[in-house]
Amino acid sequence: MSEAKKLTDKYRIEQWAIIIRERINSGKQVNEWCAENNISRDSYYYWLRKVKLAAAREKALTDEPQLSKIVPMVPPQCICGSSGSGTAIILRANGIVLEIQDCASDSIIERTLKVLMRI
């Protein structure tokens, strides 16, 4: 694709993003708003799709996931008062195994789950 075509497409997408925002801010239904603004419904939805794809593409480029280093380690022994301490939960997903011991604190479990949700 030529540089001129890329710039033209980018400009049109930016213009349609403004038009789409105006429609959303109006609170009117698409059919009603398009009729009032002499825009065909098909054009509106065509450009809505283009704007969404461009936004998703841009987000994907800016939100590149940063992979953390996975370092194998020997889990520390739990220091619990009960003799029945052992593995209470085992989670397996995408080749990752997470074992949570009986005596793990709520805060450790909560922080671990928050990190996993970001992956």
Image (cartoon, rainbow, N blue to C red):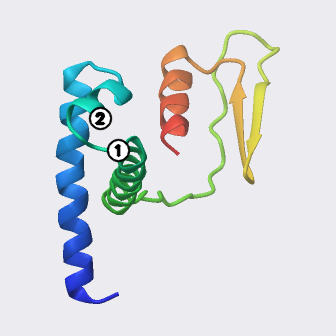
Pick the front one: 36 or 105: 36
Residue type pointed to by label 1: Ser
Q: Which mark is residue 34?
A: 2
Mark 2 to mark 1 CA distance (whole Å)? 6 Å
The N terminus, quarter of image: bottom left
Query: Sequence-wise, which precedes: disc 2 or disc 1?
Result: 2
Callout 2 crowding tier (Cα within 10 Å): few <14, some 14–19, many ≥20: some
- Amino acid beneath label 2: Cys
Q: Residue 117 appears at what percent x and percent y?
A: 53, 35
In the rendered view, tell whether residue 85 sits above or below residue 99.
above
Provide residue 26's location: percent of width, then percent of height.
20, 22
- Cβ atoms under marks 2 and 1 closer than 8 Å: yes
Q: Is residue 42 above or below residue 90?
A: below
Query: Which residue does the image show at 67% across and 33% down from the upper left?
Result: 77
For the view shown, which residue lies furthest in the right direction?
84
Left or right: 22, with 86 as reference point: left
Instruction: Choose between 100 and 73: the one closer to the eye.
Output: 100
117 sits left or right of 51 in the view: right
SS under mark 1: loop
Q: Name which residue lies at 35% across and 63% down.
A: 61
- Which is nearer the eye, 50 or 62? 50
Horizontal arrangement in the rendering, residue 86 relative to residue 13 (left or right): right
> Could you tell me which secondary element the residue under label 2 belongs to?
helix
Q: Please name the residue shown 28% across and 43% down the image.
A: 39
Which dot marks residue 40?
1
Mark drawn on residue 56: none
Q: Residue at x 39, y 41 (%)?
A: 41
